[in-house]
């Protein structure tokens, strides 16, 4: 069992985070567990480590069972082999300037100036109609989704670059947050760092989103003031980008969905399992919990329980916002596209080019609407496997 790579950091009184920054596997252990990890890393056998701990504490401990936990959690390795994701190979010196004091000042200024432009010129604020850049609905949705995907990769790449700037590797995965399918950058290795060093990687995606939003709103603001002349098509494309970025930034504030701001808040408050504790405390108000769920609450850390008392208000507010967003943006745009697609399929000659265009639009829109359900089913199957 190889533990030379493991880092140990005290998280709270009597609690330690131990894990492998390269794989992103971390667990929280008591002080005696951290001591066992130190002994294992120093080359002690299971029997020797157990004997050392018993001499130091006067209590016997099942070191073999603890060693098995380390292996099953992925913290310990059977060999020296270490997998590194491609993004971890980005040199720190190359990306570090993008996350220094000057860079963060630029990110904040972009967001503040954009908000001022929204206040001064309300017509720049996004509406669901901004999705339809072209008269051709299919072309509009294709272009919009391509742009959204590219900007999403930019958002997640900025998380990864910020992680690389502090020496933490990362990987991308498809997840679900409420009704939204999302790409997520796994930066579990950040938990090996002191809290103050985690904020930059957590906020990096929103930072670059603020820059893109500013670059989309700025030209439209100048055009609205008559300072510059822009082609109508470019104005519509910029409006579509604004809608995408505003939705993305607003989404990240939904802390109840374990978004970027949730990670910031959990770190700031020193919580380890705030989301689950809050969700179960709310669930208990409306229905009976399972024995396992009751165990989670009864054994929850006091800090998680304390913060959950007011965090529940943000949780409920986020649910309400998500419903409002679905009603005012997702449902209207889906209604337009589904209506157009069904109309084409009914009226156009079967298997004609126009008919296939309607079929493609129907399939494309269905994917966007039902993908969150598919991700939820996948996660449920993985959890019960």
Image (cartoon, rainbow, N blue to C red):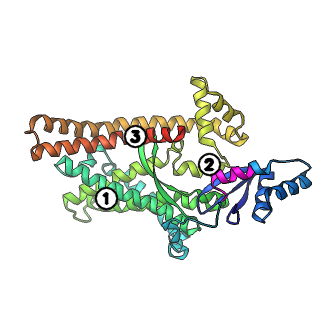
Residue 170 screen position, x and y as percent? 52, 61
Q: Is residue 316 left or right of residue 148?
A: right
Residue 258 screen position, x and y as percent? 53, 46
Alpha carbons under labels 1 and 3: distance apart:
40 Å
Badge number at residue 266: 2
Badge number at residue 374: 3
Q: Quadrant of the N terminus?
A: bottom right
Query: Which of the marked residues, 1 or 3, is nearer the chain's N terminus?
Result: 1
Q: Which residues are magenta?
A: 66-76
Q: Is residue 73 magenta?
A: yes
Residue at 17% x, 42% y is 358
Residue 26 screen position, x and y as percent? 64, 54
Q: Nearer the viewer, mark 2 or mark 1?
A: 2
Q: Is residue 199 left or right of residue 208?
A: right
Badge number at residue 221: 1
Q: Is residue 69 magenta?
A: yes
The outermost residue toward the left is: 349
Judged from the image, the secondary structure of the residue bearing numbered disc 1 is helix
Alpha carbons under labels 3 and 2: distance apart:
28 Å
Query: Which of the marked residues, 2 or 1, is nearer the chain's N terminus?
Result: 1
Q: Nearer the viewer, mark 3 or mark 2?
A: 3
Q: Quadrant of residue 156?
A: bottom left
Alpha carbons under labels 2 and 1: distance apart:
37 Å
């Amino acid at each position: 069992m190889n533990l030379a790579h493991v880092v140990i950091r005290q998280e709270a009184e009597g609690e330690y985070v131990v894990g492998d920054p390269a794989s992103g596997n971390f667990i929280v252990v008591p002080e005696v567990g951290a001591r066992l990890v130190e002994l294992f890393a120093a080359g002690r056998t299971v029997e020797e480590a157990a004997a050392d701990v018993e001499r130091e504490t006067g209590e016997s401990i099942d070191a073999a069972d603890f060693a098995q936990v380390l292996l099953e959690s992925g913290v310990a390795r059977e060999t020296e082999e270490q997998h590194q994701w491609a993004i971890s190979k980005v040199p720190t010196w190359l990306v570090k300037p993008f996350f220094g004091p000057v860079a963060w000042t630029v990110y904040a200024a972009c967001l503040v100036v954009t908000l001022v432009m929204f206040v001064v010129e309300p017509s720049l604020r996004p509406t669901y109609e901004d999705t339809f850049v072209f008269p051709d609905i299919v072309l509009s949705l294709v272009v919009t989704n391509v742009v959204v995907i590219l900007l999403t990769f930019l958002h997640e790449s900025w998380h990864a670059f910020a992680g690389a700037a502090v020496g933490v590797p990362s990987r991308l995965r498809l997840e679900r947050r409420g009704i939204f399918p999302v790409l997520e950058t796994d930066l579990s290795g950040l938990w090996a760092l002191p809290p103050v060093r985690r904020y930059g990687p957590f906020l990096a995606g929103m930072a670059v989103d603020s820059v893109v939003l500013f670059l989309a709103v700025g030209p439209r603001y100048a055009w609205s003031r008559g300072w510059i002349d822009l082609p109508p098509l470019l104005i519509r494309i910029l409006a579509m980008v604004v809608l995408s970025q505003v939705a993305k930034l607003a989404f990240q504030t939904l802390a109840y969905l374990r978004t970027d701001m949730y990670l910031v808040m959990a770190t700031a408050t020193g919580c380890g399992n705030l989301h689950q504790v809050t969700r179960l405390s709310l669930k208990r108000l409306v229905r009976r919990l399972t024995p396992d769920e009751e165990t989670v609450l009864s054994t929850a850390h006091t800090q998680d329980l304390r913060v959950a008392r007011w965090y529940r208000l943000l949780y409920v507010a986020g649910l309400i916002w998500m419903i409002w967003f679905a009603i005012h943006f997702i449902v209207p745009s889906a209604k337009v596209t589904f209506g157009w697609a069904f109309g084409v399929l009914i009226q156009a000659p079967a298997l004609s080019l126009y008919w296939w265009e309607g079929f493609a639009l129907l399939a494309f829109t269905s994917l966007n609407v039902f993908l969150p359900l598919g991700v939820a089913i996948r996660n449920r199957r993985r959890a019960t496997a």
